[in-house]
Amino acid sequence: MKAFPRTPLAAQPAQSHVEHTVLGGALVPWVGPTMEVYSPTMGESPNGPARVCLGSIPRMDGAASLAALDAAEKAFDYGMGEWPTASMATRVEAVEAFIKAMVAVREDVVRLLMWEIGKVRPDAEKEFDRTVDYLRDTIQSVKAMEREAIHFREEGGFLAQVRRVPLGVALIMGPYNYPLNETFTTLFPALLMGNTVIFKPAKYGVLLITPLMEAFATCFPPGVVNIILGRGRETVSAIMETGRIHTMAFIGTHKGASDLKRLHPHPHRLRAVLGLDAKNPGIIMDDANLDLAVAQSLAGSLSFNGQRCTALKILWVQKGIHDAFVEKLSTGIEDLTWGLPWENGSKITALPENGKTAYLNELVQDALSKGAQIANASGGQFDETFFAPTLLTGVTADMRIYHEEQFGPVVPVVAFDDIQEPIAYGVQSPYGQQVRLFIQHPESLGRLVDVFVQQVGRVNINAQCQRGPDTFPFNGRKDSAEGTLSVYDALRAFSIRSLVTFASTGDQKALVSEVLSHRSSQFLSTDFYL
Ligand code: G3H
């Protein structure tokens, strides 16, 4: 039997107690209750194994959150504040200064990604570097957008200049599985478009923001970035109830998103960018390349312990290839190294969510009681925060794992004869993020592509589901998402087009020419951003 990973007492890090937050352009001390932050990693302690305590953060309340809202609103000042009226060059300079500060604390953030959410070092480094690349690409994209905006359009006797302007105060909330990347890929587009921000870090993965707090406070004008720490229910709810949030980014469950939206007294005024639940199917046809299908299923289902919204969460395997596929996948799963995130070669680590292993065990027991089998030797074993990767075969529609998003290392396999079975699953599913097709036959592939593009936001041919490259649109249908993200789309999501128009007559053109030559408007301008 494989051993469950443990951290020796001597290797546990010094605790970090965060005693301030970012408010109105300064690091403001917090006087009030705090909450402890625990690692998913089980440590040895004199009283037996226990989750390693990493420190504590302020447990802010509704009143403190409203102070953050006041600061953000004041900085926006109905679109006339320093930040929304700043030139794009000024905003880009601020973000570039932030990136510089961010790169300087890379190792601190990577270390906390490992300790706080159990992400293995190569993936933690990838998350950090990919985020920096995303910010740099966003700067290039915003420059291109700005350059495009200098053109005037002439239609039906009118001339017009169209530009994108900010929406107002943005509430940005990130998920625990990508607490840096998925938060910053909405936060920075919102900032670059001139919005002011209230940033609530993810439930797990919050200490890793602290090395960046000073940069948040100093790189932007006062009130442009405000951070709230604590429990979502005790902070975010108070803000939403005011109706003073104009746009929100939220990555989590569709239920959580709907509850939040319902709190807003004028939901029609709230622009939302949501990344929600998914149950992406992988469909493996009899003619699939077996080795490729197994390798991609392994990575697709179990990287970061299956805690990716894009993870493959159910595998549909045609009966002719089923046994060979299951045998190879089972071997691959047993070969994955269980370990601590910083150990070389670790692939499966402990899970940060409270109660997660009990939930996964419930799913497995439910499936077993209805006729499923565990196909890998260590499947089904768990201990405290660690759950062994588990391959479940014989999965049927009466089992919870068939429907529920496990978001963890359980891999359910459904055997099928007729392709109409997985098609019906995709059509009837409440989710619609992505699908993966493993197949070689071009005719059948073409037909399947045409079916699934009507159900999901992305069809992956002979490759796992994933978000990247980040210039591709990332979205979902039904309960899986609202809005589309990409380097370019995120800039659109956090802004609205406004236009200035005038009759294309000599006197009006002369008037506007005067405005342009005197540079008396920032909006109405043909200045080119080099
Ligand atoms: O958790 C959802 C992420 O956006 C997935 O991103 O496919 O790059 O892991 P990824």
Image (cartoon, rainbow, N blue to C red):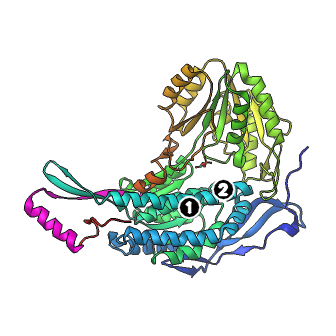
Q: Quadrant of residue 459?
A: top right
For the point 63% across and 36% down, the residue is: 463
Residue picked out by circle 2: 126
Residue found 82% across the figure and 68% down from its top: 12
Query: Is residue 284 in sight in this rendering?
Result: yes
Q: Is residue 149 above or below residue 30?
A: above
Which residue is found at the position 64% from the left and 54% from the top?
A: 177
Choose between 337 and 89: the one closer to the eye. 89
Q: Amino acid at mark 1?
A: Arg
Name the residue at the front extreme. 530
First along the sequence among labels 2 and 1: 2
Q: What secondary structure is marked by label 2?
A: helix
Number of other residues with Cα within 10 Å of mark 2, as a class: few under 14, some 14 to 19, many 20 or more:
some
**Magenta span covers which residues?**
494-519
Q: Residue at image x 49%, y 32%?
A: 453
Number of residue marks: 2
For mark 1, what is the residue? 233
Quadrant (top left, top right, bottom left, bottom right) of the C terminus: bottom left
- Looking at the rendered structure, the secondary structure element under dot 1 is helix
Examine the structure image and report whether residue 509 is included in the region drawn in magenta.
Answer: yes
Position of 45 relative to 27 (above/below):
above
Q: Are marks 2 and 1 in contact (CB under 8 Å)?
A: no
Q: Is mark 2 within 8 Å of ligand 1?
A: no
